[in-house]
Amino acid sequence: MKTNSDGDWTYSLDRELEDGNHEVYAAITDNAGSILAKSDPLPFVKRAEAVTVGSETAPSGGEENNLFGTSRLYLIGFVMVFILGVALIMIGIIAGRRKPIPEEMQ
């Protein structure tokens, strides 16, 4: 298979993979299909397992695991405003401590 311009690719099996031991590897081929380079095989086992439809429940809330959930965005915003406020206060204190330039030096 070929990759797109971003290097992404997908592959769908034309038939279901049988249960048991398998190996997968990546290879680079030329236009004739000859393998130029090949990765080490990655072994895996496919096992048939029973599935009960509807047995899994969705997590409640859904927002706790979201990095940019509404509550976390409010917290991040509050912290940023607090830091900005402290920085402005510090700048004001530093600017207030400067001695005025005497008139004869201006």
Image (cartoon, rainbow, N blue to C red):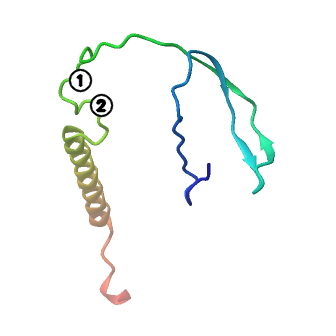
| For residue 52, above or below residue 34 | above
Foreground pick, 66 / 25 = 25
User: Could you tell me which residue is drawn at 35 percent across and 14 percent down?
Assistant: 51
Q: What SS does tag 2 mark?
A: loop
User: Could you tell me which residue is drawn at 18 percent across and 28 percent down?
Assistant: 61
| For residue 12, above or below residue 28 | above
Whether tag 2 and tag 1 are in contact, CB under 8 A, the answer is: yes
Foreground pick, 97 / 43 = 43
Quadrant where the image shows the C terminus: bottom left
Q: Which residue is mark 1?
A: 59
* Mark 2 Cα shell of 10 Å, populated few (<14), some (14-19), many (≥20): few
* Left or right relative to 96: residue 46: right
User: Could you tell me which residue is drawn at 73 percent across and 42 percent down?
Assistant: 27
Say which amino acid is labelled 2: Asn
Foreground pick, 65 / 15 = 15
Q: Residue 65 bears which disc, if any?
A: 2
